[in-house]
């Protein structure tokens, strides 16, 4: 190839590169509009702080000042301008008087005319009665292992008939006699046979411990439908009957290998649970109508084959997107799939791809053999071109994931350095769920690995997950 040919080829490459950059500049506002079209992906910035605007301050009452904006450049009209009420400033120069109004009750009141509050509407702060070490008490046995300590001092701040009663837990006893017996396979009952027990036998509390983890039980794995694999316990020693055994829906991450999924499946099978592995494909994410069809098949299977089982969801990475489509489908057809929704007793979300379309594009790039920057750019362009079929569905799924969660305890794992999830967006999600009353547990790390916390922080992960599973209403039924 001659020097002119090489020069021409370089010029063509440079022109193609400039054309690509110009295309990106032209489409950036459109992509930005797509990104900010959903409430969960956008934030409204407050008006910028200004130090050059004119304010006036005037007294509107004793200790009350009003600072108002007199500048015509204010972003707010005067009649609808927000009013921020600051707490009255603390004063050390006001005069107070203190008097006893009852035994052990003192009232301190402000006598200064400069008080910001009128006397009749002044707030009253009630402090706890001061602790007293000089009061006399008596202690007596009112029943076996039950003692009552009562105040006999006339100086008590509480009348005897309305005095608070604090109930302490019965003291632990190591000298009581117990018996242990098997009531079913893998179920043992330890009961107190000592007459000195503080509880009558018929009303004695029963503490249920989680079934012990077993690594010696036998399991079989079979495909029940395309991309659905069921691992079930075939051992007669299982603590759960087959028809009521808890079923875990494991929504794997894109490109998950069986060995990686086994780290989690083994946790559940050791507890005697069955595991249904849901293996999503890139096509489910790239073309949401396929995800809708797939989750409809999953819901049909759960209705027909597992009608009595309690369900636990464990979703990873983009698998959480597939679970969101699953939730969206149940929300759209409550009469058809409402029974599945009510059987979900717990949810675990691990490394959720969350925070914007660029996070989704990064998730696609993670499983592609092509250069990451190229895949991310192509994915963003694809989202823009197919918005009615992709982005609009993503937005509805995200909204369902945020606001349409199942009323079940939820455990959330994430890390600050996850390239596919914005830590700030995750913190906002946590705050929103807690304010909405979601029974939420959170475990986060400053540094970890996307969908790999169990590898980097194995002990902490398993301890957190185990504690969460122990708290779920999973009860073994004796097979008599």
Image: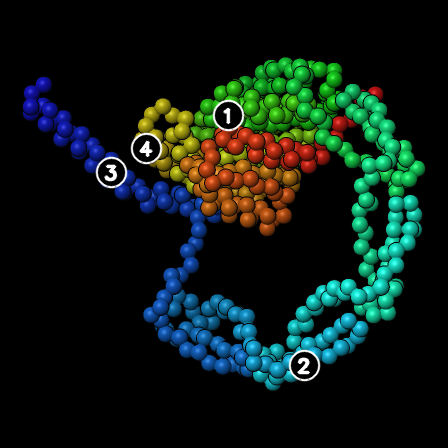
Disc 1 packing (10 Å; few <14; some 14–19; many ≥20): many
Q: Seen in the image, is 406 located left or right of residue 43?
A: right
Question: Where's residue 150, x and y in %?
Answer: 86, 59
State if disc 3 and disc 2 touch (CB < 8 Å): no
* Label 1: element kind: loop
Quarter of the figure with residue 370: top left
* Tally of marks: 4
Residue behind mark 4: 373
State if disc 4 and disc 2 touch (CB < 8 Å): no
Residue behind mark 1: 280
Question: As displayed, is residue 70 above or below residue 258?
Answer: below
Q: Seen in the image, is 125 located left or right of residue 189?
A: left
Of the two numbered discs 2 and 4 in the rendering, the one whose residue sits closer to the viewer: 2
Residue behind mark 3: 21
* Label 2: element kind: strand
Q: Return the disc, 2 or 4, that comes first in the chain's sequence.
A: 2
């Amino acid at each position: 190839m001659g020097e002119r040919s090489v020069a021409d080829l370089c010029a063509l490459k440079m022109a193609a590169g400039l054309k690509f950059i110009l295309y990106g500049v032209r489409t950036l506002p459109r992509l930005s509009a797509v990104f900010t079209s959903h409430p969960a992906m956008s934030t409204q910035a407050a008006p910028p702080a200004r130090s050059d605007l004119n304010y006036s301050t005037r007294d509107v009452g004793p200790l009350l000042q009003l600072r108002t904006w007199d500048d015509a450049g204010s972003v707010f009209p005067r009649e609808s301008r927000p009013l921020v009420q600051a707490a009255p400033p603390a004063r050390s120069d006001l005069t107070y008087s203190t008097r006893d109004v009852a035994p052990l009750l003192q009232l301190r009141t402000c006598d200064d005319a400069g008080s910001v509050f009128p006397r009749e509407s002044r707030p009253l702060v009630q402090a706890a009665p001061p602790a007293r070490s000089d009061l006399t008490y008596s202690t007596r046995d009112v029943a076996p292992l039950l003692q009552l300590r009562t105040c006999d001092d006339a100086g008590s701040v509480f009348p005897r008939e309305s005095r608070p009663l604090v109930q302490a837990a019965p003291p632990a006893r190591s000298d009581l006699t117990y018996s242990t017996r098997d009531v079913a396979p893998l179920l043992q009952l330890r009961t107190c046979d000592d007459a000195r027990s503080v509880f009558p036998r018929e009303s004695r509390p029963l503490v249920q411990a989680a079934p012990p983890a077993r690594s010696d039980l036998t399991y079989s794995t079979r495909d029940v439908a395309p991309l659905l694999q069921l691992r079930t316990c075939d051992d007669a020693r299982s603590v759960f009957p087959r028809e009521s055994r808890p079923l875990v829906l494991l929504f794997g991450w894109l490109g998950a290998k069986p060995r990686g999924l086994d780290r989690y499946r083994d946790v559940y099978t050791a507890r005697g649970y069955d595991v249904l592995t849901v293996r999503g494909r890139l096509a489910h994410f790239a073309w949401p109508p396929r995800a809708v069809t797939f989750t409809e098949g999953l819901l049909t299977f759960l209705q027909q084959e597992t009608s009595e089982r309690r369900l636990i969801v464990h979703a990873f990475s983009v698998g959480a997107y597939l679970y969101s489509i699953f939730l969206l489908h149940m929300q759209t057809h409550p009469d058809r799939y409402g029974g599945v929704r009510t059987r979900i007793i717990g949810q675990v979300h691990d490394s959720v791809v969350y925070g914007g379309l660029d996070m989704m594009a990064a998730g696609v790039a993670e499983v592609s053999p092509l250069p990451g920057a190229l895949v991310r750019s192509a994915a963003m362009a694809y989202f823009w071109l197919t918005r009615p079929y992709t982005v609009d569905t993503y937005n509805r799924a995200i909204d369902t994931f945020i606001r349409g969660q199942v009323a079940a305890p939820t455990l959330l794992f994430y890390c600050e350095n996850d390239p596919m999830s914005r830590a700030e967006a995750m913190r906002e999600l946590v705050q929103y769920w807690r304010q909405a009353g979601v029974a939420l547990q959170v475990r986060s790390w400053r540094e970890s690995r996307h969908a790999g916390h169990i590898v980097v922080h194995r002990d902490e992960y398993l301890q957190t997950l185990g504690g969460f599973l122990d708290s779920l209403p999973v009860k073994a039924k004796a097979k008599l």
